[in-house]
Amino acid sequence: MGIGPTKVVGSVVFRYTTVDSTQEELKRLLQHGKLPIGTVVIAEEQTRGKGRWGRSWWSPKGGIWCSLLMSVTTVPYFRYTLAVIRWIKDTYGLDALIRWPNDVVINHKKVAGILIERYRDLDLVGIGINVNIEQIDNIPYATSMQIESGYKIEIDEKLPTLFEAIQSYVGVDDDTILHQVRTNMAYMGNNLYIGGKCYKFEDIDATGNMILTSGNQRLVVNLNQVDHLDPMFRFLVLKTRTDNKLTHQ
Ligand code: BTN
């Protein structure tokens, strides 16, 4: 594998009608030749879409399912979630928020997810957005842009603006990213619960960790320690047996 010169996001696009997973297809393409940073693999549907922690990701026609070849950044996930939030605002005039660490939500319901996998010294950034999806059954607290806005969009027409939104966050310094993250973060300043104990969600630190407090106790939660944040009960559900490894400061 080799890496060609840096180009802008979406200047090279591989399009598919159906693929197993755009992440896997991007890996296969990388094994066969040079691709510039910013290369995008996009499919109308995925038969084995991947979510975090090896979960499957439902990817019917009507969504935006894409993977981008990107340079590694210090603060993981956030520039992509912010780009999706900006795109939703520009396209639909709707406000979306980040649900730490990698979800984009509207009214507490997940509308998009980001999966980042390291491939050699690069990030494969998978972005899934529920766009023209009329109805979602059997996935709790999930929604689509069609459900939230009441209308469908022409995906091909709007894709360049998504790539532009992602491009607009390339090279932005971490302080600016963190400032925007703090102002677009669901539950910031609210109480969250870990194993029945109540903590205040105080802040996000420079590497993207969640900072929680309970009285004098300060707890640092890394994104790899978290399974998910339950929107109904505000439980921060940790990966099995990580609770005793959390850093108290
Ligand atoms: C998550 O919230 O768990 C992350 C979901 C990421 C889904 C996207 S869809 C495009 C790309 N290809 C995949 O197989 N997964 C990501």
Image (cartoon, grey):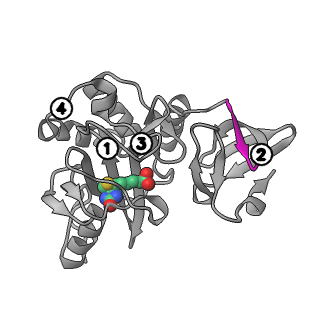
Q: Quick one: 50 or 164, which is closer to the camera?
A: 50
**Foreground label between 3 and 1:** 1
Q: Is residue 223 above or below residue 192?
A: below
In the picture, measured across the screen, residue 183 lies left or right of residue 81, that is: right
Residue 11 lies, in percent from the top left, at 16, 51
Mark 4 or 2: the one toward you: 2
Marks 3/4: CA–CA distance: 20 Å
| Residue farthest to the top, as pictured | 93
Callout in the foreground (1, 2): 2
Q: Is residue 191 magenta?
A: yes
Check disc 4 and report its element: helix, strand or loop: loop
For residue 198, say whether it is visible: yes
Mark 1 to mark 4 CA distance (whole Å): 13 Å
According to the image, label 2 marks what residue?
A: 196
Residue under numbered circle 1? 129
Query: Which residue position is annotated with label 3?
Result: 81
State the CA–CA distance, disc 1 to disc 2: 32 Å
Above or below: residue 5 compared with residue 197: below
SS of the residue at dot 2? loop
Q: Within 10 angstroms of label 4, few (less than 14), some, or many (20 or more) residues? A: some
Q: Earlier in the sequence, mark 3 or mark 4?
A: 3
Q: Residue at x 86, y 37 (%)?
A: 215
Residue type marked 4 = Ile
Query: Could you give the CA–CA distance between mark 3 and mark 1, rounded to whole angstroms?
Result: 11 Å
- In the rendered image, residue 97, in percent from the top left (x then y), is placed at 47, 32
In front: mark 3 or mark 2?
2
Q: Amino acid at mark 1?
A: Ile
